[in-house]
Image (cartoon, rainbow, N blue to C red):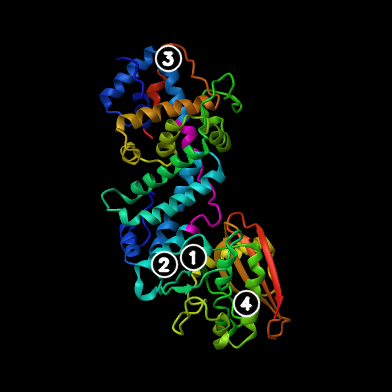
Amino acid sequence: MNHPGPLLTDYVDGTLDPTTRAEVDAHLRTCATCRGELSLVRAGAGAAQRLGEPALPEGLGDAAIAEAARMAAERNPEVTPIAGRARRRPATSRVLAAAGAAAAVLLLIAVAPKLGQGSNESAARPAANVADGAGASAASAFQPATGVEIQHADYASDSLTGVVERLRTSFAVVAPNASQVEGGAGPTRGPSLPTAQASADPALLPKATACLNQAFGNPSGTLSRVILASYQGQPAYFGIYLIGPGADLPPTLLQLNVASVHGCQLLSQTTARL
Amino acid sequence: MADPPRGASDPELVRRFLAGDAGAATELITRHERRVYAVCLRVLGNPDDAADAAQDALLAMVRKLDGFRGEAAFSTWLYRVAMNVCYDHLRRAQRRPVLRRDDDAAAPEPAIDDHADAVADAHDVAAALAQVPEDFRIAIVLADVQDMAYDEIARVLDLPVGTVKSRVHRGRIALARALGIEPAQEPEGRSEASKETRR
């Protein structure tokens, strides 16, 4: 037989039929070159097979999960009154909060304008966003978050102050009236829309909470909402904490912590007195 | 992706997602993200690129699910999607690792004996793998790291099985050389090979 070449890989795999294997064995007995090649094939295969499974980066599938939620919402018009496709560019997009098990989807209105966008456009856009749904949460101020809301939006650093101010205002009023704060611009939020909490995905909460804790340390208040969105172009968890003096007294401080999904790095923090 | 599905099968989850169930896609993503990341890491060679590529691959998977017709196994289909994304990343970044010649390779410590088994740890292997030319690297990543059958690799890469086998063969040799392993030199007539056992 000639030099067996790639048959040596079959030989190492143990997939040769007995006749061919015997021929290869016979050749190997007389050919030092092929014995050398065989040793390399065996060494290479053994090395590659020893590579372990790598650790999975935090939040790897989150963007795909958010996209799936958006697509499922589009496929399900009964629960998704969406007029246009959600886009990754917030200045032209609607913001979507993905549904939980009930597949209910909350349509939120355009987010705070991104840096560099036309100012006339900005002026026309309501600043609803992370702040939306805060009123519903205010009814049970100290109730912890039950899931992660997914928003297809990107927030800029200069929009966070406005977000926190809106959250603060919303928490300051009685829950049912909170939606009045939203103003008249953009789609009207109907009474049948689920609350922010109801639209949250509980499966993502442990990872998101751990990530926020890693970035900021364990919080002193109650994590009342967690939102998965984008901050300055990168996937981020937005944790909204209500911090009170304790003893079941109402919260006095609202804190928005932003941590990157990848690596759980601290990205931003904004607080406001309630 | 050889794992038996827990609960609903992959095609069933695809059907449910296409019917509007976002949770079905979440389960598909959770089920497969680990292996998508692993193949991207071994093909691209560094964790940052791999995370980007795996994220893109999972996004592409979700967006293309309505094109999954069930002719191929879902895992085969997903590997195709993932490999296409990896190819894009390889092209875009122009980070095509070149097999270094032995004389200029920053090779890991040479083998103490002629068998890699006693030598390289996973870190060395990962570094050496990045030096294996792309086509051969991809072949051994799928065959030896992901433990896929040659005919499935052929379907993923759209290549004849013989080509896959040949690339695996050359890839294994290239990986051994990148690890600084030299061919075993044995006395003529010794039938080392007859000790082979099936893996």
Q: What amino acid does circle 3 point to?
A: Thr
- N-term-proximal mark, 1 vs 3: 3
The residue carrying mark 3 is A33
For the residues bearing labels 3 and 2, Cβ distance under 8 angstroms: no
Task: Tell me residue A121's x, y (percent).
Answer: 55, 66
Q: Is residue A250 above or below residue A68?
A: below
Same chain shared by disc 4 and disc 1:
yes
Tell me the quarter of the picture where residue A271 sits: bottom right
The residue carrying mark 4 is A167
SS assignment at label 4: helix
SS assignment at label 2: loop
For the residues bearing labels 2 and 1, Cβ distance under 8 angstroms: yes
Q: Which residues are magenta?
A: A45-63
Task: Report the front residue among A168 and B12.
Answer: A168
Task: Tell me residue A141's x, y (percent).
Answer: 61, 82
The residue carrying mark 1 is A93
**Residue in the image at 27% along x and 28% along y:** A17
Task: Tell me residue B67's x, y (percent).
Answer: 31, 53
Is residue A46 within the magenta segment? yes
Task: Report the front residue among A20 and B18.
Answer: B18
